[in-house]
Image (cartoon, rainbow, N blue to C red):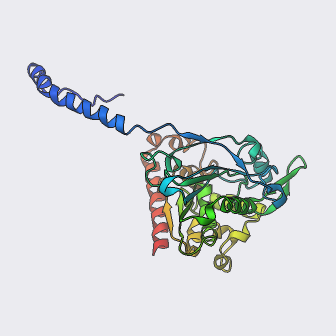
């Protein structure tokens, strides 16, 4: 039911007087709002074309289907002409031959399906929408390996053709090409990404830092990539199972912290809570403690609850029962505790 936000509170006989007295103020507010909107209008997002990595196949740096990887580059200008922001695209993972086979028939597994991208938010060249980075060189690296730019292996598709797990080589080929396009003389550089791309930013953070002289300011930003290794509603570790498949199918061991591998399984070392312990480069973590993806896939994945008990709640929090809300609060508290332990 709609709520009437401006319900009349004055007696009927005084309403006309109240409206008349308020009219000048309302007119002034209207003028201010119109003027503010005219000044704060954000331009429509620009479309940036796809660039395929040169000589990618010769380097073995290919997407799941063997096509060359790509990125979108918009040149910086003015005072930001020598600053670079590298954004690694996200899009979950594939952890089985079947899921990777399905993935290679989309832009998340093949550059054949990639098109120009609209740059908005932190990628925008509008100083009102993106005051900190609008004039920087902005690069979006397309995600087409299914393992957070980390794998280095080869498999066989269900139809007998090859599947290429070459995320690590894609990372190296793209960064090498960008260094040749001016990033080698950067004054500032920020490596970031979202979701699986955010995890990739953590995996490659120190490697990225190592490509620049010490006097260059280099930082990393992990946005929505702090996936946690906890039990789901049924008591199983569904997220660990998913990541375990990725780690072993795509051979991501090479990029994992050596100190972590000395004491823990490679699957554990793939989680952000372990990766962050080994990163020496200044790194920012941005993550919602009520992350909707983690609620749907880590806390309450399909199969972890009877019938449709959580389906409605996962679709819309307004459908959650008081008991389910308590569970969500518990998940939030757990996320906070894990982050607090890391910061100590």
Q: Is residue 244 above or below residue 51?
A: below
Q: In which quadrant is the C terminus drawn? A: bottom left
Position of residue 59 in the picture relative to residue 192 (left or right): right
Could you tell me which residue is drawn at 50 percent across and 50 percent down?
A: 122
- Location of residue 11 in the rendering, given as x and y in whole percent from the top left corner: 11, 23
Whether residue 271 is visible here, answered yes or no, is no
- Location of residue 43 in the rendering, given as x and y in whole percent from the top left corner: 47, 38
Count up the numbered dots: 0
Whether residue 29 is visible here, answered yes or no, is yes
Could you tell me which residue is drawn at 67 percent across and 71 percent down?
A: 256
Position of residue 322 in the picture relative to residue 145 (left or right): left
Q: In which quadrant is the N terminus drawn? A: top left
Position of residue 195 in the picture relative to residue 127 (left or right): right
Could you tell me which residue is drawn at 43 percent across and 55 percent down?
A: 329
- Location of residue 304 in the rendering, given as x and y in whole percent from the top left corner: 61, 51
Could you tell me which residue is drawn at 44 percent across and 61 percent down?
A: 333
């Amino acid at each position: 039911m709609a709520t009437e936000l401006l319900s009349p509170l004055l007696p009927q006989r005084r309403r006309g007087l109240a409206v008349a007295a308020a009219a000048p103020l309302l007119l002034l507010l209207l003028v201010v709002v119109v003027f503010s909107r005219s000044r704060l209008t954000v331009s429509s997002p620009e479309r940036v074309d796809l660039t395929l990595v040169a000589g990618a196949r010769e380097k073995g740096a290919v997407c799941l289907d063997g096509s060359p990887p790509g990125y979108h580059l918009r040149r910086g200008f003015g005072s930001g002409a020598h600053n670079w922001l590298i954004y690694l695209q996200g899009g979950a993972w594939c952890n089985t031959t079947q899921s990777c086979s399905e993935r290679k028939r989309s832009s998340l597994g093949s550059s054949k399906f990639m098109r120009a991208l609209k740059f908005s938010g932190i990628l925008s060249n509008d100083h009102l929408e993106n005051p900190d980075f609008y004039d920087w060189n902005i690069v979006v690296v397309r995600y087409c390996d299914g393992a957070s730019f980390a794998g280095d292996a080869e498999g066989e598709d269900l139809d007998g053709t090859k599947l290429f797990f070459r995320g690590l080589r894609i990372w190296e080929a793209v960064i090498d090409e960008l260094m040749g396009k001016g990033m080698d003389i950067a004054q500032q550089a920020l490596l970031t990404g979202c979701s699986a791309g955010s995890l990739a930013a953590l995996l490659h953070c120190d490697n990225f830092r190592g490509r620049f002289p010490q006097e260059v300011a280099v930082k990393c930003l992990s946005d929505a990539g702090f996936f946690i290794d906890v039990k789901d509603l049924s008591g199983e570790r569904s997220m660990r199972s998913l990541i375990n498949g990725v780690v072993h199918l795509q051979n991501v061991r090479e990029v994992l912290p050596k100190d972590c591998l000395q004491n823990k399984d490679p699957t554990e070392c793939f989680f952000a809570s372990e990766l962050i312990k080994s990163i020496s480069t200044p790194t920012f973590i941005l993550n919602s403690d009520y992350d909707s993806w983690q609620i749907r896939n880590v806390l309450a994945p399909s199969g972890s609850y009877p019938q449709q008990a959580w389906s409605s709640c996962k679709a819309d929090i307004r459908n959650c029962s008081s008991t389910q809300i308590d569970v969500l609060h518990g998940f939030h508290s757990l996320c906070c505790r894990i982050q607090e332990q890391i910061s100590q």
